[in-house]
Amino acid sequence: MAEITIDKTDRRLLSLLQEDGRITVVDLAEKLGLSPTAATERLRRLTRDNYILGYHARLNPEKLARGLLVFIEVKLDRTTPDVFERFARAVVRAPEVMECHMVAGGFDYLVKTRVADMTAYRTFLADVLLSLPGVRETHTFAVMEEVKNSAALPF
């Protein structure tokens, strides 16, 4: 399916939503120089065409006992389609895993997790990650300082 072309106003609308996902349609329309009806139609079209995938609250991990951010390189014991599939099915069920990406390079997956502290991470590693299908080896990178944390896409 060919990607639908979006115009400058659509891009501005998406940028404004990334800055404030709770902006009212009236305020959005005003900033775009559109009527509320026109802004609503653009929102509907961008949502229908999957440019907008959802709206989320950004939570404070410290307040929710998830202050330690950890990235883990995962090597699988074999790189066959069935091993990849079994690992992927299992990792999506682990609530501690925020992101998991199959990557090219010296390892197979990069996993991002947030836990309370290093003790909680050791428990996660032993009880969850190392028990996933096909895991042969892991390398852990605990984050000392978050320099930039953004889900916003550049325009």
Image (cartoon, rainbow, N blue to C red):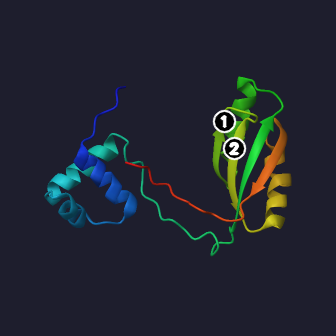
Measured as percent of width and height from the top left, residue 83 is found at 75, 29
For the point 84% across and 46% down, which residue is it?
130
Q: Are marks 1 and 2 in contact (CB under 8 Å)?
A: yes
| Element under disc 2 | strand
Locate the N terminus and report the quarter of the image it occupies: top left
Q: Where is residue 45, by image quadrant?
A: top left
- At label 1, the amino acid type is Val
Distance, label 1 to label 2, CA atoms, is 7 Å
For the point 80% across and 57% down, which residue is it?
124
Of all residues, the one furthest to the front in this rendering is 147
Instruction: Give the number of the disc on residue 103.
Output: 1
Measured as percent of width and height from the top left, residue 148 is found at 56, 60
Is residue 133 something that shows in the picture? no
In the image, 153: left or right of 27? Answer: right
In the image, 38: left or right of 154? Answer: left
Mark 1 or mark 2: name the one nearer the start of the chain: 1
Measured as percent of width and height from the top left, residue 4 is found at 30, 33
Q: How many numbered discs?
A: 2
For the point 69% across and 72% down, which residue is it?
65
For the point 28% across and 35% down, which residue is it?
5
Q: Is residue 137 above or below residue 85?
A: below
Q: Which residue is mark 2?
A: 110
Along the viewing direction, whichever of 142 and 3 lies nearer the viewer: 142
Along the viewing direction, whichever of 111 and 11 lies nearer the viewer: 11
- At label 2, the amino acid type is Leu
| Element under disc 1 | loop
Measured as percent of width and height from the top left, residue 61 is found at 62, 69
